[in-house]
Amino acid sequence: MIDKGVFALKYRFRKIVGSLVIIAVCAAVVTVSIPAPNPAIKLPVPSKQRVTSKNPISVHPLAAGLGQVMLPGKTKLPASFTKLKDKYHLIPIPTYDGSYQLTHPKVLYFPKAWNGYKYWMSMTPYPYEHDMYENPSIVVSNDGNTWAPPTGLKNPVSGIPADVKVGGHYSDPQLVMHGDTMELWYRYNPALPNKKNRRRPDNSVNVYYRKVTKDGIHWTGAQKLLQSKDGHLSLCVNYEGNLYKTWYATYGGNLSYSESTDARQWSAPVTCVVPLPKGLVPYHQDMIKNGSDYYLLQTAEQKSNYTFHLFLLTSKDGIHFGNAQALYPSKDMALWKNISFYRSTVFVKDNKLNLYVSMIIPHLKWYMTQMTIPLPKAADSSKIDKTVKI
């Protein structure tokens, strides 16, 4: 088990290091007048643009320290993406900052389309691990390969937190269907108060908000759902019957389950049984139900070196999981030797499990690939296999 304080401190330190390189830039460049938390803040268009003979390239203010970063809509992809595209079979998914680096995907698949699109994805940009960009966004597709924001939508849907310049940030979006209404849930970590004007997020406080829409374009204001210091990492949500069912990782390294009728009052958490190899603990997850079977796509943290592995587990009750199998996008194991697999997403299509897999490619490049696997039989909760090998 990971001690809550140690876990939070380690997580906070990693975030701080990732943010230090842009502190000076943000102080000098970002001139947004920020109102209360959760507004749809428009970042200013920079006064200077770098232009080539064919492709105008606008440098996003928050990305000024990251080198050449293009805004979405340009035909030319970032060089860092094109260099790795064929090797890792990357899927080009545009981000509002133009980096095409992203993580935390959640895909909902509609065989007959919902408001004109079969695939709806929530995600967060995360260029070179800078959480200032980690603002939940929506992209859509009709073939699973060509993605763009739906016509009429401007990302990020969440807006930008009011305290972004001093450490506050969003993360961990989740799409949920409640009847014909789409809901976007996402996490907020406030800035950690300090007197030295340093950018420091408080990763021990987890607040979740929700926005809803009928068409995917027009979203309501943010509604606060819960606030926790017990973990609530990578909350994933299913709406089944009349219940919101949620699963989340705790600071203690467990996967917990809780449910609610209104998303405001929650049942006491239940600790799930998630057999993983020794030294690995739940960190990020996606959960779906197909028929009577639950499928858990579990990102597991290697505690000793803060790397990540991806597993699929199954269950009949959503609490006791088994049949764990380590997942890799291809059988070329040498290709994945130095790759960490982060928060990914799974859905059922054509009687197969379809996955969009989030990868961390050296050095801190956050891209996405795809894979499909046969639909496995759910584990018998009374015969859980606890011997798992990577």
Image (spheres, rainbow, N blue to C red):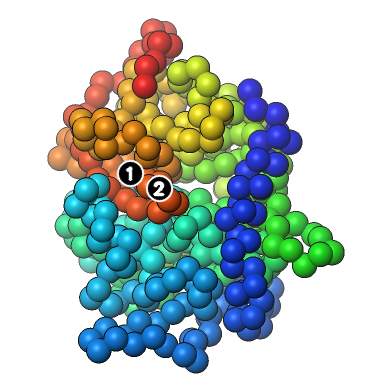
Amino acid type of the residue tagged 2 in the rendering: Pro
Instruction: Report how far apart the C-alphas of labels 1 and 2 lie in the structure.
Output: 16 Å
At x 73%, y 36%, the residue is 5
Q: Which mark is residue 362?
A: 2
* Residue 168: x %, y % from top left: 66, 61
* Foreground of the two, 15 or 119: 15
Q: Secondary structure at mark 1?
A: strand
In the rendered image, the vertical position of residue 171 relative to residue 94, given as above or below? above
* Residue 374: quarter of image: top left
At a point 57% along the width and 47% down the height, the residue shown is: 263
Identity of the residue drawn at 65% across and 27% down: 2
Q: Is residue 273 left or right of residue 109?
A: right
User: How crowded is the residue under tag 1: few (<14 C-alpha within 10 Å), some, or many (20+)?
Assistant: many
Q: Which residue is mark 1?
A: 357
Residue 328, percent across and down? 28, 33
Q: Nearer the viewer, mark 1 or mark 2?
A: 2
Which residue is more in the foreground, 304 or 131?
304
